[in-house]
Amino acid sequence: MMRIDRSFSEAVERAVHAAESGTAAELIVVVAARSGSYLDIAGAAGAAVAMVVLLVALFAPQEFHPVTVAIETPVAFVLAAWVAHRSPGFLGAIAPGARSRKQVERAATEHFVAEAVHGTRGRTGLLVYLSLLEKRVTLLPDFGVEGCVPAAAWAEVRWSATGDPSRPRNRDDVVRGIEQIGAILRAHMPCQGTDLNELSDAPRIVR
């Protein structure tokens, strides 16, 4: 998973500041560890492990005391479910793509409201929502941006120089994507006179 530390936050803040230069738009970057709990998937993994433990107890050549089986099976379920839930790489790998996409879109909408992206004077906010577990980025523009920038323009953003261009893999990929967003905004929403920085450039980190 991408390393989120002070150097990451500082690099993103500099990239946002540069991207906003020359445009009337305001970028708000939210980086979330995950967009869903995926407890059901972790529970399914725990159930699968518990089933294996039970089958071994039933069909192994040696005999197991019923009390031992009654204790070890639920313990195996709990431990396996806990490990699965604490393993972002595992959850991200087995979560269905459609499920991950919906989770990220829903979470992005919630953060759009929570971060008051709609609170700028000209409704010129743009949320850049990055969810690490799902390795997905969602862009949510406010009305002022939506009216100036064609929706198809956001497809031009290439987050990764190698691999899937829609999924950033490291800090440099995130900075690259923000730079490209800034170029799009300057082309479609140039700054008109004096433009105040209404929102903080620092990324919001959601653990």
Image (cartoon, rainbow, N blue to C red):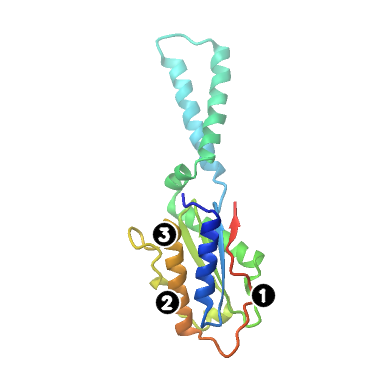
Residue at the spot of label 3: 167
Mark 1 surroundings within 10 Å by alpha-carbon count, few (fewer than 14), some (14 through 19), many (20 or more)? some
First reached walking from the N terminus: tag 1 or tag 3: 1
Residue 15 image position (x, y, % from top left): 50, 69
- Local SS, label 3: loop
Q: CA distance from mark 1 to mark 3?
A: 28 Å
Residue at the spot of label 2: 153
Residue at the spot of label 1: 119
First reached walking from the N terminus: tag 2 or tag 3: 2
Looking at the picture, tell me which residue is in the foreground, 50 or 6. Answer: 6
Looking at the picture, tell me which residue is in the foreground, 52 or 93. Answer: 93
Q: Residue furthest left?
A: 162
Q: CA distance from mark 2 to mark 1?
A: 24 Å
Mark 3 surroundings within 10 Å by alpha-carbon count, few (fewer than 14), some (14 through 19), many (20 or more)? many
- From the viewer's perspective, is residue 132 above or below residue 58? below
- Local SS, label 2: helix
Q: Is residue 50 left or right of residue 120?
A: left
Residue at the image point whose x is 39% and y is 73% from the top: 156
Residue 86 image position (x, y, % from top left): 54, 40
- From the viewer's perspective, is residue 57 above or below residue 192? above
Residue at the image point whose x is 47% and y is 76% from the top: 182
Query: Would residue 128 be visible to someone looking at this image?
Result: no
Q: Are marks 1 and 3 in contact (CB under 8 Å)?
A: no
* Type of the residue with mark 3: Arg
Q: CA distance from mark 2 to mark 3?
A: 17 Å
* Type of the residue with mark 2: Ala
